[in-house]
């Protein structure tokens, strides 16, 4: 080792980043990029061999790759995309359709941004859906103002928050009293009652029920479940609210794009390094210790992993208050979604779905009751005997995911509770069988074309993605865990009781999904707090 | 033909409360009641000789003491007896009791978990804190956030100020509390399932929600807001049954010169040029009044008694979608002797309180799943009380009246109407549950009245048998109850008011909707209310 | 963990005796002339035994036995016990040697005091925490991340306070050899009845005194041993009323009397920081992080502390308990939470909570308004009050080592 090497190493150890980001998921990378773009020296520490977090792909059968947990983009924040120079153009140039599958092969197909037009429904139903869509889009628009900023501080409403409140109030008032009243009435309603109020077509009602509860431990009849649907409608892609797409080249292009943006901004990215401890002294975070024993110090530590892992595993609880530890322990974060990847020897064909629409998202949720009944067992740690799911065919967007002639199918399946009674080791095969039988109903012959099947339960996700509870939102996205209470009140708004430690994962406001917003807002907060 | 100042549709407790206040303010008020007795859902009926049944509502604590005082109800015979704790029986032959004495309560919980026993104090403290926030709102008209009238703005500011008295941390806690399920809320304090199941019951009584539904933590509050003579959260029996409440109201009303007509079923509200002018009875008789006040629920009032074309379209739409799905049933039982529960110690005070059999959250939630599926619960949640243990006036000496409130029980069974056979099968489910814990129970039964939502709707007139005249979910509380923009007891029809539990602050034998409605009516008439004492301070 | 069915059933009978009796109850009941009982944490405890006034003088001139068994006691043990308690409490536990006791307090995350109490270091990794209120959930939740066992042992351990100038002589006579080596806030184990009794030189009276902890089974034999030994030294059994007088003279505060504990307040503004109840001296800002540290230091830095607890000396001899304190006879400045005529100091003393800047910046011209009910008429008096240091009395015998035999 030369003396200059030694100097560099010492230098490296003694300080020397402005910020350390724990976790190379898309939020961690977004935060790192933004800080680096503003002249900060940033390192991202990722435990896995690759960055990308839940977008991290893997080979599940020789020659067949899964693109990770997320199989469609519906809320990538345009500002994040712009700052990171992410290519958001779609393969087809237009949003992907959603096919609400019906067992009889007569499906409803939503086109444009969340059903601007719908094929396969009656004119009356089309009118009803349009009315509901308009109403909910407007209401989601009001909420959206609060998703693109730090959660307001109650009791101490800052001027900038007043602006958001005033803006929300103004848009309510200009729309007229009735709209305002409806907003306050509907905000915390359940999705089923709203769907029932407008719609009569079970396929559409089932779809709304499904989208409202996907990834959330609620049924469509649970009060506040409409929030999940609003959340879906606050997402925008390519300037279109409610739209969804798969990037050119497939979902698997997204994770590297985030990393490339970070690297381009000057972030050093270290993979395969485990953080074992966030060091702190009397209320101030000082650095991190790695699995190798190496210590890195920086004035700013950004944890872009699950808040419970951050505080209960990486921090010494002695550095935190008992009340805080209690509150963090109370975060509800047990996943309900299983991810199925199928390796197929040919393109699957869903009955009644046009070849083009196979590129979109297909949803099995026959009715509100179907979703509700699928949810019920999850309350008791049982999986749904008649599950609901959304399906995409990833190899259609990127043929490299499967060998020539082959295909992949990806499905997000509910409800698969993290804490399965009797354990997933015993229950997984039975659940997988049910899912495959369900798919066979809609795509006859599918089972015969299966080369390999890989079902990831929330328990598997926890192991594979270091995702406590296997919950992709890093904490239930329910009314009591939002805004000033996300992840907990004392750590809402990215700062934590430990000075110098910031949060930037989906567990923080505004929540999960491939949006980049928690990362963006956390970085902004840090930049304004530490100019 | 006589023209009254006010015609009241329905002689339930809220109708009578409003009628009393209006009559005392100097108006000439007529109460029309379809049944041959007044009382609505607060009645004591002698359905078998010698026994008085509180056959709908069965406990009294929410009834506001200010109203009792103003309307001189004690003078007219109302007396409330506080009752002692109660117990939930566990399937392993034990029970967990609730005792009024603080240390006994802790020791009882400590039989299950020392930690939970001590956690209870913090839990009770936190719930009481939330209650103290809500309680002052009960006797105030909910502000309309979109009216921009000075009064609404000042009421909103009052709300804001109340909220502002919290620390930032407390505010955040309050926001969480309002949207949590009682199950999640209890999980933050307790580790023992049976303790959670016991405490969760107040989160589900009367609601079409399970303990795991968000919003049930608030429902718990709704049941805790009651008091018996200043002892907040205490429950009691009205001496002589719940009919004593409405009998006292009726007596007070008549003593101040009001008129009651029973057997007078209102068929329609009369209007002239859009204004309510009186009502038409089922037999065609017209009864005229300057004002009409409806104690009936919002659906019955506007979907049955008022011409739809007299109402704005949005209003009708919202009334149609107002949720008041019935979720409970009731068994009223005359007993030959006091049932024995071998699990309880001899002479246990628990028999004088409420008894339950649902010892786990899962059982309680599964009971709700049945309701969602359009079935009555196969393993129902039963809130059982024997008022005669404290009030012997309700049955012959040595005999007892038992009230079993049962959840869940849907207004329709899988889309079809109830039959008598369904009803009997439902009753048997409940009786079997009790008999499992009380040998020989069936043999003690002298008479039994079974009420599903069908019977409740038929007799009391509550649409779909919903005991709260509308579910207690966020979209139906405060300025949303019953319909946004019409949450201040006035309706789209000038001269027609609502005063039942469909209005703020909602159900329970509380009387607050009736009193608040009377205050708004008198305000419109520019009259001073006589003897409406201010709401008690919460200090 | 839910207890087993048989254990649970065996405990059902608790309801037959809603007031538990302490292990010493048979002796105190036999001595009780006044039959003057009150409820202390679910136990039947004497308010007085024979004469409140004379009981007080037993503390100050001979030896008084006071049953402290209802005090809530937790045993905290394990390799992380010191680290755990250092995070839990505001005082530096690393400085508490084995065989020593210190008075301490603990706070929630907002720096509000949950309780105060005494911490006994029985062994390097074993502690006993004694306090007024119950805290098991808080103590257990605080243990997340620590290798420590926490057990509530209120029922199992009986406690006795032996206080007064002849208390040392009584213990000597009772045969506790080596007791003379015990300095204030030290503790040691002594043989008793085939087992041991832990004796600490502590107390709640500001006088020479000891506290003795023994397994409940050995309680009566301990009582008898002390009682026999004390016959020639004027030993008397006393109730809370007498002890309360002594503790006010000593300037000690009582939870939920002189301040409200944070987990019990219904009104959020009633909780207090250590600095607001005279416990600022316990807070060690230099030691590792502890619950409430950030909030307390922030309040100090931003000067947002709202209250202060002071000792008052009030003119005249009418006790001022519950009186409102005024500045310049007109501005409300606070409230008296405890007050007596001190027989020892011959002064009218009080403990009061004042709203800052009263008690910090504005210390002059303070008055208390006393409403004395005399034969169905209030005698209203406005009396001058002066802030004085606590304790109100200082007795050399309290700290003398070895203590005098008297």
Image (spheres, coloured by chain):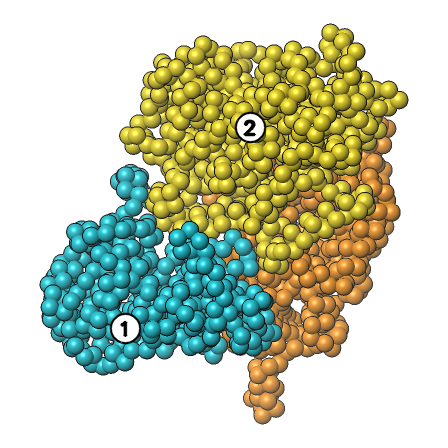
Which residue is at 43% across, 64% downward? C320
Q: Which of B10 and A261 is in front in this view?
A: B10
Quarter of the rendering containing residue B402: top left
User: What is the secondary structure assignment of the residue under circle 2?
Assistant: loop
Q: Which mark is residue B73?
A: 2
Identify whether B205 is placed above or below A320: above
Q: In the image, which lettered chain appears yellow?
A: B
The reply, left or right, for residue B193 in relation to residue B473 is left
Q: In the image, which lettered chain appears cyan?
A: C
Q: How crowded is mark 2: few (under 14 residues within 10 Å), some or many (20 or more)?
A: many
Q: Mark 1 points at which residue?
A: C207
Q: Mark 2 lies on which chain?
A: B
Q: How crowded is mark 1: few (under 14 residues within 10 Å), some or many (20 or more)?
A: many
Q: In the image, which lettered chain appears orange?
A: A
Identify whether C202 is placed above or below A66: below
Where residue B375 sits: x, y (%)? 56, 23
The reply, left or right, for residue C154 in relation to residue A125 is left
């Amino acid at each position: 080792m030369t003396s200059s090497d030694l100097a560099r190493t010492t230098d490296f150890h003694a300080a020397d980043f402005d910020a350390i980001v724990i976790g190379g998921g898309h939020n961690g990378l977004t935060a790192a990029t933004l800080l680096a773009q503003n002249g900060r020296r940033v390192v991202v520490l990722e435990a896995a061999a690759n960055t990308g977090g839940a977008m991290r792909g893997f080979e599940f059968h020789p020659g067949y790759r899964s693109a990770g947990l997320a199989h469609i983009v519906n809320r990538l924040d345009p500002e994040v995309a712009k700052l990171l120079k992410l290519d958001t153009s779609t393969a087809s140039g237009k949003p992907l359709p959603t096919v609400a599958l019906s067992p009889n092969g007569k499906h409803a197909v939503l086109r444009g941004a969340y059903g601007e037009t719908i094929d396969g429904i009656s004119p009356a139903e089309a009118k009803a859906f349009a009315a509901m869509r308009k109403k909910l889009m407007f209401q989601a628009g009001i909420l959206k103002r609060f998703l693109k900023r730090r959660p307001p501080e109650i009791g101490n409403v800052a001027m900038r928050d007043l602006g958001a409140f005033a803006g929300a109030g103004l848009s309510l008032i200009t729309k007229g009293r009735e709209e305002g009243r409806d907003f306050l009435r509907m905000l915390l309603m359940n999705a089923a009652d709203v769907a029932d109020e407008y719609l009569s077509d079970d396929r559409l009602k089932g779809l709304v029920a499904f989208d409202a509860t996907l990834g959330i431990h609620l049924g469509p009849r649970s009060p506040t479940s409409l929030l999940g649907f609003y959340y879906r409608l606050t997402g925008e892609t390519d300037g279109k609210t409610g739209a969804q797409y798969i990037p050119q080249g497939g979902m698997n292009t997204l994770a590297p794009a985030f990393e490339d943006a970070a690297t381009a901004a000057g972030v050093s990215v270290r993979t395969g390094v485990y953080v074992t401890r966030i060091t702190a002294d009397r209320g101030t975070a000082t650095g991190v210790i790695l699995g190798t024993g190496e210590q890195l110090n920086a004035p700013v530590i950004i944890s872009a992993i699950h808040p419970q892992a951050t505080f209960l595993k990486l921090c010494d609880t002695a550095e935190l208050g008992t009340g805080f530890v209690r509150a963090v322990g109370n975060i509800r974060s047990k996943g309900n979604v299983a991810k199925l990847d199928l390796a197929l020897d040919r393109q699957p064909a869903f009955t009644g779905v046009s070849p083009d629409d196979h590129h979109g998202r297909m949803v099995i949720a026959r009715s509100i009751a179907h979703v509700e009944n699928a949810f019920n067992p999850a309350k008791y740690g049982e999986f749904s005997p008649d599950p609901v799911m959304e399906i995409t065919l990833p190899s259609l967007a990127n043929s490299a995911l499967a060998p020539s002639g082959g295909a992949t199918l990806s499905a997000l399946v509910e409800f698969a509770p993290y804490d399965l009674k009797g354990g997933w080791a015993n229950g997984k095969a039975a659940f997988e069988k049910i899912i495959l039988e369900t798919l066979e109903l809609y795509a006859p012959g599918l089972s015969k074309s299966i080369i390999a099947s890989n079902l990831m339960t929330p328990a598997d996700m926890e192991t594979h993605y270091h995702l406590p509870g296997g919950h992709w939102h890093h904490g239930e996205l329910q009314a009591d865990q939002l805004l000033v209470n996300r992840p907990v009140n004392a750590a809402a708004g990215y700062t934590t009781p430990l000075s110098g430690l910031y949060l930037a994962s989906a567990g923080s406001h505004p929540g999960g999904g491939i949006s980049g917003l928690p990362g963006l807002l956390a970085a902004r907060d840090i930049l304004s707090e530490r100019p | 033909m006589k023209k009254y100042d006010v015609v009241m549709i329905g002689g339930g407790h809220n109708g009578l409360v409003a009628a009393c206040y209006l009559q005392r303010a100097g108006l000439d008020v007529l109460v029309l009641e379809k049944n041959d007795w007044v009382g609505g859902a607060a009645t004591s009926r002698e359905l078998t000789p010698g026994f008085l049944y509180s056959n709908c509502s069965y406990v009294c604590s929410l009834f506001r003491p200010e109203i009792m005082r103003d309307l001189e109800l004690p003078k007219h015979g109302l007396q409330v007896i506080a009752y002692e704790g109660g117990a939930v029986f566990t399937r392993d032959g034990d029970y967990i009791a609730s005792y009024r004495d603080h240390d006994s309560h802790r020791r009882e919980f400590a039989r299950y978990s020392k930690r939970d026993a001590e956690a209870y104090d913090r839990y009770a403290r936190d719930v009481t804190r939330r209650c103290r926030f809500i309680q002052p709102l009960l006797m105030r008209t909910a502000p309309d956030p979109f009216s921009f009238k000075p009064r609404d703005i000042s009421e909103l500011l009052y709300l804001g100020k109340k909220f502002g008295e919290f620390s930032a941390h407390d505010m955040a806690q309050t926001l969480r509390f309002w949207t949590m399920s009682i199950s999640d809320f209890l999980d933050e304090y307790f580790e023992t399932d049976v303790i959670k199941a016991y405490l969760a019951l107040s989160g589900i009584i009367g609601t079409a929600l399970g303990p795991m539904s968000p919003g049930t933590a608030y429902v718990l509050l709704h049941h805790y807001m009651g008091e018996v003579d200043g002892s907040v959260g205490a429950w009691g029996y009205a001496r002589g049954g719940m009919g004593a409440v409405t009998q006292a109201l009726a007596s007070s009303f008549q003593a101040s010169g009001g008129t009651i007509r029973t057997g007078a079923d209102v068929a329609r509200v009369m209007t002239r040029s859009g204004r309510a002018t009186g009502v038409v009875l089922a037999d065609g008789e017209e009864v005229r009044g300057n004002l009409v006040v409806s104690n009936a629920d919002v659906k019955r009032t506007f979907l049955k008694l008022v011409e739809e074309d007299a109402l704005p379209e949005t209003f009708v739409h919202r009334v149609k979608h107002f949720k008041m799905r019935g979720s409970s049933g009731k068994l009223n039982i005359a007993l030959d002797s006091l049932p024995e529960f071998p699990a309880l110690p001899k002479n246990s005070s628990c028999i004088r309180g409420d008894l339950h059999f649902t010892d786990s959250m899962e059982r309680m939630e599964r009971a709700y799943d049945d309701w969602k599926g359009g079935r009555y619960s196969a393993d129902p949640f039963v809130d059982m009380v024997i008022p005669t243990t404290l009030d012997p006036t309700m049955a012959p000496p040595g005999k007892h009246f038992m009230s079993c409130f049962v959840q869940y029980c849907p207004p329709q069974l899988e889309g079809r109407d109830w039959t008598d056979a369904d009803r009997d099968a439902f009753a048997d489910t409940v009786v079997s549950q009790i008999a499992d814990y009380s040998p020989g129970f069936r043999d003690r039964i002298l008479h039994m009245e079974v009420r599903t939502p069908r019977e409740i709707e038929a007799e009391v007139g509550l649409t779909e048998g919903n005991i709260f005249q509308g579910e207690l979910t966020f979209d139906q509380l405060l300025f949303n109850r019953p319909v946004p923009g019409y949450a201040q007891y006035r309706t789209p029809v000038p001269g027609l008011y609502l005063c039942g539990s469909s209005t703020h602050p909602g159900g329970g034998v509380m009387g607050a909707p009736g009193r608040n409605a009377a205050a708004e009516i008198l305000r419109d008439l520019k009259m001073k209310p006589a003897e409406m004492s201010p709401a008690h301070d919460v200090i | 963990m839910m207890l087993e069915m048989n254990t649970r059933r065996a405990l059902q009978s608790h309801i037959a005796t809603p007031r538990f009796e302490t292990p010493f109850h048979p002796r105190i009941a036999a001595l009780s002339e006044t039959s003057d009982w009150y409820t202390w944490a679910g136990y039947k405890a004497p308010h007085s035994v024979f004469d409140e006034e004379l009981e007080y003088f037993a503390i100050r001139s001979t030896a008084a036995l006071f049953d402290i068994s209802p005090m809530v006691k937790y045993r905290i043990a394990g390799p992380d016990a010191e680290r755990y308690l250092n995070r839990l409490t505001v005082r530096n536990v690393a400085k508490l040697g084995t065989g020593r006791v210190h008075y301490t307090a603990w706070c929630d995350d907002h720096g509000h005091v949950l309780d105060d109490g005494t911490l006994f270091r029985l062994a390097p990794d074993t502690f006993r925490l004694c306090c007024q209120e119950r805290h098991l959930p808080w103590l257990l939740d605080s243990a997340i991340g620590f290798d420590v066992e926490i057990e509530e042992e209120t029922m199992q351990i009986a406690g006795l306070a032996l206080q007064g100038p002849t208390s040392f002589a009584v213990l000597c006579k009772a045969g506790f050899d080596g007791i003379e080596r015990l300095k204030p806030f030290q503790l040691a184990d002594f043989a008793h009845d085939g087992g041991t009794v832990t004796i600490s030189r502590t107390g709640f009276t500001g006088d020479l005194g000891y506290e003795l902890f023994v397994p409940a089974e050995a309680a009566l034999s301990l009582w008898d041993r002390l009682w026999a030994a004390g016959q020639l030294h004027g030993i008397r059994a006393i109730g809370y009323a007498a002890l309360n007088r002594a503790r006010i003279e000593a300037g000690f505060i009582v939870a939920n009397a002189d301040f409200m504990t944070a987990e019990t307040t219904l009104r959020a503004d009633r909780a207090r920081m250590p600095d607001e109840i005279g416990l600022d001296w316990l807070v060690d800002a230099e030691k590792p992080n502890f619950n409430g540290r950030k909030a307390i230091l922030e309040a100090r830095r931003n000067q947002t502390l709202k209250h202060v607890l002071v000792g008052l000396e009030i003119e005249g001899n009418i006790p001022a308990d519950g009186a409102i304190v005024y500045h310049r006879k007109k501005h409300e400045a606070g409230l008296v939470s405890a007050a007596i005529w001190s027989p020892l100091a011959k002064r009218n003393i009080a403990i009061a909570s004042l709203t800052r800047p009263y008690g910090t910046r504005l210390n002059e011209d303070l008055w208390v308004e006393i409403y004395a009910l005399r034969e169905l008429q209030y005698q209203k008096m406005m009396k001058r009050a002066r802030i004085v240091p606590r304790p109100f009395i200082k007795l050399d015998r309290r700290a003398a080592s070895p203590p005098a035999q008297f």
